[in-house]
Amino acid sequence: MSRPDGQARFDRVVMDVGEPLWEALETELVGYGEIQPQAGLFGDGAGRCVLWFDEGVPVSVRHTGTGRSGSEALADIAETGPYRVRLVETADVETVQHGEIPPAAPAKRVVGDADLADRTREAADDPEPAEPDAELDAVEAFLADDEKIEAIQKRAAMEARKRAEEWGFDVAEE
């Protein structure tokens, strides 16, 4: 998926994507954000999520690794941080890829920030919250991905072993 050139407005590693979502909303970003979750930062090449913004409001999302879009793409990044996030302002709105995503979906489903979701809906002139079933779809898509669940379990086990060693506990081998 090619993306237009533009000016990077935010480029750093964050523990959750709330900060860059607020930044996009407050600056009325026209462009896109590349969100690389923790697994990608550690070199597994799982891909990244590309979230398109029109005046700071999320309008489309696609995951480069899975090719999924919408709620399913959001489920692909719904894990704990850190995340590498890069917001890019493009020349004009013509370059923005619009799709089917409720404006508040990233704020609700990835960050869990009700205030950000409300402000995003206000900016989008979308007074109605997304249907509860749409929220459930993202959770179901995430839970149905056995590879993702297994990868999270492995990372958690590695982290637990590391912490146990740091704290001087005996570590049982599998």
Image (tube, rainbow, N blue to C red):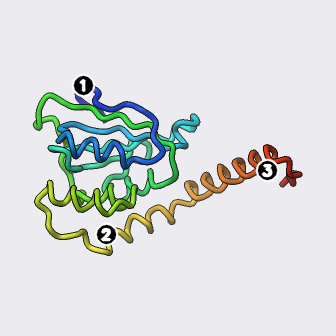
Question: Residue 50 at x, y = what percent?
Answer: 33, 42
The residue that mark 3 highlights is 164
Q: In the figure, is residue 7 to the left or right of 150?
A: left
The residue that mark 2 highlights is 134
Residue 34, quarter of the rendered image: top left
The extreme bottom residue here reads 132
Residue under the image location 45 percent in, 55 percent down? 78
Q: Secondary structure at mark 1?
A: strand
Q: Nearer the viewer, residue 152 or 128?
A: 128
What's the residue type where badge 3 is placed?
Answer: Ala
The residue that mark 1 highlights is 7
Residue under the image location 39 percent in, 41 percent down? 35
Q: Is residue 115 above or below residue 58?
A: below
What's the residue type where badge 1 is placed?
Answer: Gln
Sequence-first tag of 2 and 1: 1
Residue under the image location 45 percent in, 40 percent down? 14
Question: Residue 148 at x, y = what percent?
Answer: 55, 54
Q: Distance of mark 1 from mark 3, alpha carbons?
A: 44 Å
